[in-house]
Amino acid sequence: MLIKKRTGIEIPSSEITPKSVYLSRRQFMRGAALSTAAVAAGGLLAACGASETEPTEAVSTNIATGSSAEESFIQEAMPGPVSTTTDELGDPLNSFEEITNYNNYYEFTTDKERVATLAKDFPTAPWQVEVGGLVNKPKTFGLEDLLAFEQEERIYRLRCVEAWSMVIPWVGFPLSKLLNEVEPTSAAKYVRFETIEDRENMPGLSRGLFPWPYVEGLRLDEAMNDLAILSTGLYGEPLLPQSGAPIRLVVPWKYGFKSIKSIVKIDLVDTMPQSLWMRAAPNEYGFFATVNPNVDHPRWSQATERRIGEFGRRETLMFNGYADQVAHLYDDPNYDTTQSS
Ligand code: MTE
């Protein structure tokens, strides 16, 4: 894991990581979408799986420019340009364009390549995250409160349950810092997260495909692990709506569906939260969902994955390569995508 804290360096990201790198490998996107659609073949509803339409050429999206006062404020909190071009395993970062044009955000659409367009005008400011439940000091955090936590760069691999992956230079802060501020009581055992349910601006909500709102959860000790972050940006820039702006969870040792976007509510609870995927397809998606190459999804192998932008497949790593940091959290490392206890 690579960590860089806010440095105040003023050099734009574009000078460190040339735009040609951000915008490269675009031609691979179509292939990525087609293979994803193949995985989801059969018309079954699947996490990260179904594609509504024939994939089209990836949409190019500009990095947020920070025109409003709120946007400039977020920009100010960012830790500066990315510090490296690879992760700690030597894997190259995915380009900004890949990361922001191939997204799963079902509140907008199940078509990965249309999320960026449909989410373009999604209002992400002002924003509040209400944190409560079994805590001594419930608090509603505004964006400025969230950005007051020291923002760090975290280069993580994201492994979707659908067997594709990316390397993403996130900006954010440990979830534990926010939880410590509200002081969970001794009765708190789990953390429950909820995404905004904005029917006016999220066209996918009205399709009634899923039991909205999107809900996810972690056991409290998982949530307190230093790898679990709340992300506010990527590539040294504030998050764009398709990536879960203004704030999302990132838990890199679990399948991507655990990394819930655009969070408005966090509750400390004493019983295991029922996530959206546990309710939608309990035989396929369980609570723990730790990345495990030895436990196949009921409908496909999890032994290998396709890194977006690459041909061929890579071997999937236990806990997505983060076993040293998280294996101790689990008695049985073979928790699979369907296991809930
Ligand atoms: N969060 C919400 N609210 N809605 C979603 O549809 N999709 C999940 C997760 N978080 C999703 C979500 C899935 S399936 C994945 S793989 C990741 O977001 C994808 O994150 P990315 O689009 O930034 O790559």
Image: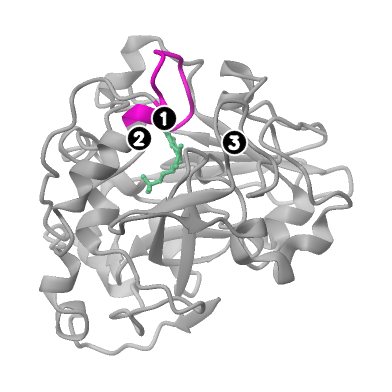
Q: Which residues are magenta?
A: 37-49
Residue 85 in the image: above or below residue 203: below
Q: Earlier in the sequence, mark 3 or mark 2?
A: 2
**Residue at disc 3, secondary structure:** strand
Determine whether, in the image, residue 311 is placed left or right of residue 295.
Answer: left
The disc label shown at residue 216, or none: 3
Q: Neighbour class for label 2 at 10 Å: few (<14), some, many (≥20)? A: some
| Residue at 45%, 76% in the rendered image | 87
Tell me which secondary structure the magenta stretch mostly adopts.
loop
Q: Neighbour class for label 3 at 10 Å: few (<14), some, many (≥20)? A: many
Image location of residue 310, percent across then percent down: 31, 59
Amino acid type of the residue tagged 2 in the rendering = Thr
Mark 3–mark 2 Cα distance, whole angstroms, equals 23 Å
**Residue at disc 2, secondary structure:** helix
Asked which quadrant contains residue 103, the reply is top left
| Residue at 32%, 12% in the rendered image | 206
Residue that badge 2 annotates: 36
Say if disc 3 is inside 8 Å of ligand 1. yes
Residue 129 in the image: above or below residue 74: above
**Residue at disc 1, secondary structure:** helix
Residue 12 in the image: above or below residue 340: below
